[in-house]
């Protein structure tokens, strides 16, 4: 983990408070959808993002804690 795009993806999910698709996230953070898709898979593996259903994601409590500095990225 620990890539700048990861933080931007998490921030987009956290600030919206919504379940979002990779396309919507990519548009809002000005990145390619394919790149966002790859990173979302990794964020899901680390428990920071939850796949709600195929193609839709939301931030988890651990993801919120990571953004606020409460969760140590080395422990993820």
Image (spheres, rainbow, N blue to C red):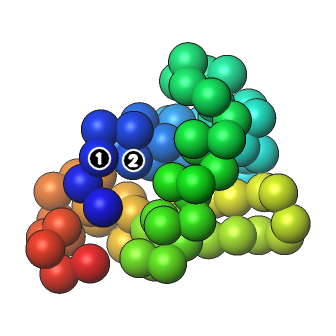
Q: Is residue 32 visible?
A: yes
Give the residue at the far right of this rendering.
54
Question: Which one is in front, 13 or 54?
Answer: 54
The quarter of the rendered structure image containing the N terminus is: bottom left
- Residue occupied by mark 2: 6
Count of residue discs:
2
Q: Residues within 10 Å of mark 2 (few under 14, many from 20)?
A: some
Q: Is residue 18 visible?
A: no
Q: Position of residue 42 (x, y in %)?
A: 48, 67
Relative to 31, is 67 above or below?
below
> Who's the residue at 70% across and 70% down the image?
51
Image quarter for residue 7?
Answer: top left
Q: Is residue 45 left or right of residue 64?
A: right
- Residue occupied by mark 1: 3
Does dot 1 land on a helix, a strand or a loop?
A: loop
- Spatial CA distance of label 1 from label 2 is 5 Å
> Who's the residue at 67% across and 41% down the image?
34
Q: Position of residue 75 (x, y in %)?
A: 17, 81
Q: Residues within 10 Å of mark 1 (few under 14, many from 20)?
A: few
> Who's the residue at 61% across and 22% down the image?
28
> Who's the residue at 26% across and 78% down the image?
76
Q: Position of residue 52 (x, y in %)?
A: 77, 70
Assess whether mark 2 and mark 1 are in contact (beta carbons under 8 angstroms). yes
Relative to 13, is 40 above or below?
below
Name the mark on residue 18: none
Q: Is residue 12 left or right of residue 20?
A: left
Question: Which one is in front, 69 or 56?
Answer: 56
């Amino acid at each position: 983990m620990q890539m700048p795009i990861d933080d931007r993806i998490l921030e987009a999910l956290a600030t919206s408070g919504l379940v979002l698709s990779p396309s919507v996230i990519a548009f809002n953070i000005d990145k390619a959808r394919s790149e966002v898709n790859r990173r979302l898979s990794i964020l899901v593996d680390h428990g920071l993002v939850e796949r709600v259903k195929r193609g839709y994601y939301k931030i988890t409590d651990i993801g919120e804690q990571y953004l606020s500095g409460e969760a140590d990225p080395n422990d993820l």
